[in-house]
């Protein structure tokens, strides 16, 4: 409730000058408080390239993301971290070795590497290259984990809890991988 009240007060204070508003907005028309004038937004994007070392690997990319946030010039906004591959995932979790091993075992239980996957039956697929890997398990695991995470940026810094880390999860390595980092928000 306090947040909503503060927002309305902020909108009214911004609207007091009348700059950037139609007469209906200045009068509080169109169903509510006047709208704030558009703010200049900063958008920063970068591609991070790395090479994984194992078939299933959790790679901590937190510092890479935090550095992009710092370089972006965004004070308050969002950062989206997205894998550009169908056999990797991006997650937020603790980077603790025993937990990582637990997660690997969980993924193997949910999508076993040696199970039967139609995707691995290359003779049934029209577009399969002869040297394509049999990686149906990696695709299914990526479906379970997701390809991106969006996080808050406040005061020019990535907002994570004490144990939270941004992890790229390799599910079909080792191979080169690319992660997209987009930061959008109000400038510092």
Image (spheres, rainbow, N blue to C red):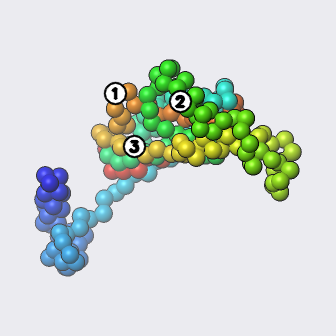
User: Is 55 above or below relative to 132?
Assistant: above
Crowding near the residue tagged with mark 3, few <14, some 14–19, many ≥20 C-alpha atoms within 10 Å: some
Looking at the rendered structure, which numbered label has been put on residue 151?
3
Crowding near the residue tagged with mark 1, few <14, some 14–19, many ≥20 C-alpha atoms within 10 Å: few
Disc 1 is placed on an element classified as loop
Which residue is at the front of the view, 144 or 132?
Answer: 144
Looking at the rendered structure, which numbered label has been put on residue 140?
none
Which sits earlier in the primary sequence, circle 2 or circle 3? 2
Instruction: Confirm or deny contact between disc 2 and disc 3 (CB under 8 A).
Output: no
Q: Residue at x 50, y 20 (%)?
A: 98
Task: Find disc 2 in the rendering and name its residue.
Answer: 103
Disc 3 is placed on an element classified as strand
Which residue is at the front of the view, 145 or 69?
Answer: 145
Which sits earlier in the primary sequence, circle 1 or circle 3? 3
Residue 115, position as x, y percentages in the image: 71, 39
Q: Residue at x 43, y 28 (%)?
A: 94
- The answer to whether residue 79 is left or right of residue 174 is left
- Confirm whether residue 85 shows in the render: no
- Confirm whether residue 81 shows in the render: yes
Task: Find disc 1 in the rendering and name its residue.
Answer: 162
**How far, Cα to Cα, is label 2 from label 3?**
22 Å
Residue 161, position as x, y percentages in the image: 34, 32
Which sits earlier in the primary sequence, circle 1 or circle 2? 2
Residue 99, position as x, y percentages in the image: 48, 24
**How far, Cα to Cα, is label 1 from label 3?**
14 Å
Which residue is at the front of the view, 111 or 122?
Answer: 111
């Amino acid at each position: 409730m306090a947040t909503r009240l503060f927002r309305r007060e902020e909108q009214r204070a911004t609207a007091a000058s009348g700059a950037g508003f139609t007469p209906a907005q200045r009068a509080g028309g169109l169903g509510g408080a006047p709208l704030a004038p558009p703010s200049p937004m900063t958008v920063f994007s970068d591609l991070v390239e790395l090479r994984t070392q194992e078939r299933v690997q959790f790679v901590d990319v937190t510092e890479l993301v935090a550095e992009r946030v710092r370089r972006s010039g965004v004070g308050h906004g969002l950062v989206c971290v997205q894998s550009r591959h169908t056999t990797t995932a991006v997650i937020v979790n603790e980077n603790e070795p025993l937990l990582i091993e637990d997660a690997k075992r969980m993924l193997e239980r949910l999508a076993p590497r040696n199970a039967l996957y139609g995707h691995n039956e290359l003779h049934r697929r029209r577009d399969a290259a002869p040297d394509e890997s049999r990686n149906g398990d990696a695709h299914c695991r990526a479906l379970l984990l997701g390809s991106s995470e969006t996080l808050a940026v406040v005061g020019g810094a990535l907002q994570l809890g004490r144990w939270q880390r941004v992890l790229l999860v390799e599910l079909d390595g080792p191979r080169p991988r690319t992660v997209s980092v987009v930061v959008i928000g109000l400038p510092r």
